[in-house]
Amino acid sequence: MHPAYSVILFTTTSGAGYGLLALLGLTAATEAALPRIGGLIALLLALGLITFGLLASTFHLGRPERAWRAFSQWRSSWLSREGVLAVATYVPALALGLLWLSGREGDWLLALVGVTAAVLSILTVMATGMIYASLKTIRQWHHPLVVPAYLSFALAGGGTLLLIFASFGGVAGLVHWILASAGLVLTLLLVLLYWRSIDRQPRDLDPAAATGLSNLGPVRQWEAAHTADNYVQREMGYQVARRHTGRLRRLTLLGMTISLLLVIASALLPGLVAGLAALLAALLLFAASLVQRWLFFAQAEHIVNLYYGAQRA
Amino acid sequence: MTSLPDTSRPGQKKLGLVIDLDTCVGCQACAVACKEWNDQGWSAPLSDIDPYGAQPLGVWLNRVHGYEAGEGANARTVHFPRSCLHCEDAACVTVCPTGASFKRAEDGIVLVDPDTCIGCKLCSWACPYGAREYDPDQGVMRKCTLCVDRIYNDNLAPEDRVPACVKACPTSARHYGDLGDPNSDVSKLVEERQGYDLLPELGYKPVNKYLPPRRRPVGEHLAAMDSVGEEGNSLTERFFRWADKALSR
C-alpha cells in the first residue's frame, strides 16, 4: 500500500494525543494528578496533537470541504465511527479543562469527566485501528494485533508525554514511570509479535486463484491491461524492498528501546534532567512510531496486485 | 446510506454481467466503449491526467488483462476483462463514511454519488477486485455504473438499453441481465457453462459471473501426432510407419 503521509502523521500524532488525554483523564482526580498549570498545558498539548492530526487527515481527502459528511455513516463504517468518536471526545476533554481551571481537584465530577474522556479516547484509537483491521483485502492489516498495537502506541506516547510534565512539575512518581515504561514494553512486544506473525502468515492466494483459472494450470500475466500504471497500481501496488524492511524494523526497535531506557533513567535522575530525559524519550518514540506506521503501509500487500502480476498475496 | 440493502428475498433483482472467457478475444472494445460512454454520461468526467506525457494516468472503469494459463501444449492465453462485480456483500459500500457509496435496493447496482464523495479512497482499499479508480482531478472515486444511464434510458432504442461494454463486444463475450432471476438468459448461461465467482472465499458474493474457457483438444491432437501410425493397417498408415522408422534411425 502506498504510504499516505497525511494518514501516517494523523495516526501517530492523534494517537499520542489521545493517549495523553486518556492518562490525564484517568489520573485527574488521583494523587498522580499534575499541578494545575502543568495539567492545563498537558491538556492543551493533547488537544493540539489531536486537532493537528485530525486536520492532517483531511489533507488526503480529494474533497476536504465535504469532510463533515463523514460523520453520517457510523452504523456501518469504522472511518465514520472514528470521526464521530474523535469529535465527541472534545466534549469531556474541554469539560475536564474547565473543571481543572475551577480547581476541583479530587472531586467526583472531575473523576467522572476524566474517565469519560479516557474511555472516548480509547474508543477513538480503537476505531482508527479497526479501519485497517476490518479490511479483508490486506492480510497484514486484517490481523488481530493491529488494534492492540494502535492502542499500545497511544498508551506509550501518552505515558512518555505525561512523564515529561510530571518530571518538570516535580510530581513524577511510580505511577508515571510505570505508565510510560509499561506502554513502551507492551508496544515493543506487540510490534515484535506482529512482525513475526505477518512474516509467517501463509500466502496462499496466487493469480490462478484470483482469476479462477486454476483448473487450467498455473496462471501468469503476459500482457498488462494498460501501458501506464493506473490508480490501483499506484495506490495498492507500493511495496518496500525486503532489505529496507529489516533496516527500518531495527531502527524502530532501537528508537523504542532507547526511549524505554531513558524513561527508566528519568526515574533515577533529579527533576530538570529527568524531564529532559523524558522529553527525549517521547521524541524518540514519536520518530519510531512514524517509521513503524510507514512500514505498516509499505509492508501491506493488497490482494488486487494478483491481477497485476504479483505471484502471491 | 452505506448499510447494505437486504438482497436475500427470493426474486430480488440482481443486475450484472456474465463474461465469457472462452470467446473474449481481448480487443479492448468494451474498455474503450465504457470510457467513451461514461466520460459523457452520469459518471462524467473520467479524467485523464497528463494524457500525452511520460506518465499518463487515466480513469477507466473496465480493464482487459491478458493471462497465460496452463503449461506446455495445453498453455493458452485468456483475455480477462475486469470491472465492478456489483457484490451482494459489498465491503466498498459499508466502509464508506459519507453514504456516497451505495448499493441500490431495487436492482443491486453499486454506485458512487460524485456530489457527496469526499475522496478518502477507503472503498478502493476494501475492494479486492480493483474495480474502483480515483479521479485525482475531480477528487472523487469512480466505478462501473452498469451504465445505469443507458439501461433505464427511454431515449434510447430498446436494443441499446444495455451497458456500453455489452453493446460494443464483437464476439458477444459479455452478457447483461438479471442474475437474481433463475430463468433469465444470463442465469441459464451461468448454469449451462458453470459460471463462477471471482475469489468466492473472501465472501463478497459478486453478482457478475465468469464463464470458464472451454477445454480444447490441443494436447490430444499433439499426443495423436506422437503415436502416428502405431495402429491401423491401411497403405497410408503403413507408409507413414515405415517413414517414421526410417526418419527415426
Image: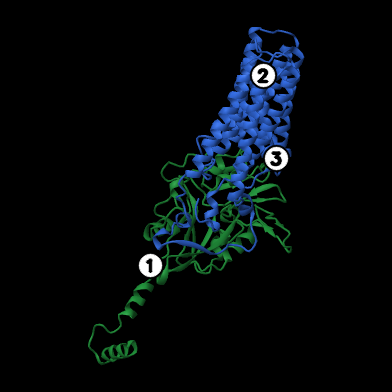
Please report whichever mark, 2 or 3, sits nearer to the chain's N-terminal start.
Answer: 3
Above or below: residue A174 compared with residue A4: above
Does B9 sit left or right of B25 as displayed? left
Q: Which amino acid does label 2 sit on?
A: Leu
Q: The blue chain is which one?
A: A
- Measured from the top left, where is residue B155 in percent x and y? 62, 58
Q: Do labels 2 and 3 share a chain?
A: yes
- Measured from the top left, where is residue B38 in percent x and y? 64, 57
Q: Mark 2 lies on which chain?
A: A
Q: Quadrant of residue B22?
A: bottom left
**Dot 2: element:** helix
The residue at 47%/44% (across/down) is A201
Q: Which chain carries label 3?
A: A
Q: Is residue A88 visible?
A: no
**Dot 1: element:** loop
Q: What residue type is labelled 3?
A: Ser
Q: In the image shown, does A264 or B193 lie closer to the viewer?
A: A264
Quarter the N terminus of chain B occupies: top right
Q: Quadrant of residue A277?
A: top right
Res A268 label = 2
Q: In the image shown, does B4 or A82 lie closer to the viewer?
A: A82
Above or below: residue B111 compared with residue A154: below
- Where does label 3 land, which residue? A6
Res B215 label = 1
